[in-house]
Image (cartoon, rainbow, N blue to C red):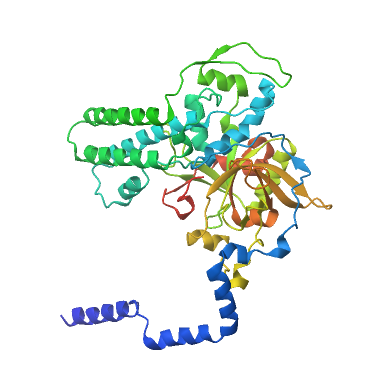
Amino acid sequence: MKQLIILTVLFSVFFSSFAQKSLNEKEIKEIKTAYQSDNSYLKAVTNAVSNNTIRNLALNRQNIGKYDHEFKYKVSVKGITNQKSSGRCWMFTSLNVIRPKAMQTLDLPLFEYSENYLYFWDIFEKSNLFLESIIETKNLQTDNREVEWLFNNVVGDGGVWSSFTNLADKYGLVPKEVMPETHSSENTQLMIKLIRRKLRGDALHLRSMKGTDDILRKAKLNSLKDIYKMLCINLGEPPTEFLWRYTDKNGNLTPYKKYTPKSFMKASLGDIDYSDYIMLMDDPTKEYYKLYEIQKDRNVLEGKNWKFINLPSKEIKKYALKSIQNNEAMYFSCDVGKQLNKDEGLLDTQNYDYESLFGVKFDMNKKERILSHESGSTHGMALVGADVDQSGKITKWLLENSWGKSSGHNGYLTMTDRWFDEYMFRVVILKQFMNEQTLKILKQKPIMLPPWDPMFSEDL
């Protein structure tokens, strides 16, 4: 009994030492005094900030005009796409990486694959994957972390390169004219919200059902019939075959030809092997030179999870430069909102000086920003150019964006090399541009990561 009392006291002392503490009047007074000690400066800043936008006031004038938009090395790309009000940047980026090959193969002056076609199957397959995961976890409590994650991440616009390859391998590709954009494909928010509502309700029904797997999957199939109907109403029904002709860059009109989506992908790209493309990532929160895989991070049930080699950015840049020099565009994702000057079309760490404006320090490094959820991948673009100084050192990079021609510098963004180091997260590069040491990492058993890892809260 005596020992129990002693342990109780010790536990009480231990936990009380870590108890939360309210601010008292003395502390508040100290904070106020510190603020008022530099009143002349703060009065001017308060007047400025309270009457203007923070970004405009923090704009570093010394950085304006410092960089041009010329590049020594550039992939042969043409035409700017526009994802409008949707989160399909990963899909636009993936198609932008391969469409130069299609233009070359078909001898086209301009060309664009149908993003709407792939988007239809992306949401449909994600719906099936979600419902299958609900069946798989139906005996777990609703407050189980995996179940909570499933209900919080039903379906959405997000994805990565492997999401694209899963869809292309299963469903093929079609020209944009065959399944053009609709209002809902360009403005996805409400459609996705309603599909999530429908799937969450159906998921609760599945979790409450008794019976065999066959009974559950019959209910799942009925749910998917409703999802298919909703997608058709919003996006149109995807073609299983189509007639298509085009005018080549010499002005010659080709005869109509019948295609299926898979036969058209082969006709426009040849025998492309998407497994030749490897995702490289710079995540300093994890050990470098290792292979990683994210659990349940895919859009097609039988498709591949998101898998990547973790490398320092200095290694990734060597391969990226070699790819550009060989006229190969790359899938690239980053934290685009950090230090983006939209008017200049420039991504640089010195664009905005928030520290001088507020008189405070923002000094987290890349690792700390990831761990604290301050930074992560928010947008995908195609990496298509690089510039070097007289000594051959890389100074800046060129990104083909999917925000339309009027955004950035004629639809492109120029990214400085120092910004690359801080805010680049993923680049997909062909195997042929990597050395044997890096390729050997692919033979490792992947380190499995949970889908709620801080680095993967957004798939872009």
Q: Residue furthest right?
A: 390
Q: Quadrant of residue 338?
A: bottom right
Q: Is residue 143 left or right of residue 80?
A: left
For the point 28% across and 37% down, the residue is 135
In the picture shown, does residue 28 fall above or below 45? Answer: below
Q: Is residue 167 left or right of residue 251?
A: left
For the point 47% across and 84% down, the residue is 32
Image coordinates of residue 141 in percent, x first then y, are 24, 49
Name the quarter where the N terminus is drawn. bottom left
Residue in the foreground of this view, choosing between 26 and 290: 26
Image coordinates of residue 208 in percent, x first then y, are 19, 40
Q: Is residue 155 left or right of residue 276?
A: left
Residue 424 visible in the displayed image: yes
Image coordinates of residue 378 in percent, x first then y, are 52, 50
Image coordinates of residue 60 in percent, x first then y, are 67, 64
Q: Residue furthest left?
A: 1
Residue 270 visible in the displayed image: no
